[in-house]
Amino acid sequence: AQSVTQLGSHVSVSEGALVLLRCNYSSSVPPYLFWYVQYPNQGLQLLLKYTSAATLVKGINGFEAEFKKSETSFHLTKPSAHMSDAAEYFCAVSDRGSGTYKYIFGTGTRLKVLA
Amino acid sequence: EPEVTQTPSHQVTQMGQEVILRCVPISNHLYFYWYRQILGQKVEFLVSFYNNEISEKSEIFDDQFSVERPDGSNFTLKIRSTKLEDSAMYFCASRASSTGELFFGEGSRLTVL
């Protein structure tokens, strides 16, 4: 079965610093991977997705992620953090083995941006 | 841009009461899902629905839960007799095809007292 692991439940960075949020996946088939952002008391907004095309995926708000099969990783990065990036970030994998292709989410990483 | 809409945005109920959460998926979508997020925790899959029947459900989705598509537009989640631990944000999602992108609603926050 597919799964994702997010290392670090809380990450703090200074404004202007690099953001790196880690996600590792486990999948018996080529995965479809996603990053979502959730601002306080709001829903889930798709940041970017990987569906077996280019391994470097660019998303909204300056975020990007690189699919690395050898490392089974799909880490999210942003070169320069902004105060407005403070939120919870979820990595997800589409469960292509189940037939329903439901998304399975990681436990989330709360990003704090320090002034 | 088409979107998934959910009502109510917040509902407070007494333990043991029945609750119905409503969702209007994107109009040409055929696959529907409910997810749950207990405060501060991960987003958990509850159930998927296709062709007027449940296609998969998690262990969370016990006999207290049911889903229905009563007409051509609504998709509902019913909790028959709410418990304190049902307090959570419930997200509806839909997609046009089995492998297409999943679109999420803004969520319905349920508080059980």
Image (cartoon, grey):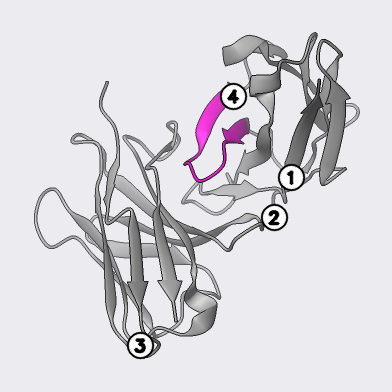
Numbered mark located on residue A49 in the image: 4
Circle 4 SS class:
strand
Name which quarter of the figure residue B53 lies in. Answer: bottom left
Tell me the kind of residue under disc 3. Ser
Q: Is residue A87 left or right of residue B92?
A: right
| Chain of the residue under the numbered disc 3 shown in the image | B
Q: Which residue is mark 2?
A: A1
Q: Which residues are magenta?
A: A35-49
The picture places residue B25, in percent across and down from the top left corner, at 25, 43
* Tags 1 and 3 on a common chain: no
Going from N to C along the chain, the mark reached first, 1 or 4, is: 1
Q: Which residue is mark 1?
A: A28
Nearer to us of marks 1 and 4 is 4
Rendered residue at 31%/34% (across/down): B96
* Tags 2 and 1 on a common chain: yes
Circle 2 SS class:
loop
Nearer to us of marks 2 and 3 is 3
Please rate how many residues cluster around mark 4, counting C-alpha atoms within 10 Å: few if below 14, some from 14 to 19, many from 20: many
Rendered residue at 14%/48% (across/down): B73
Nearer to us of marks 4 and 3 is 3
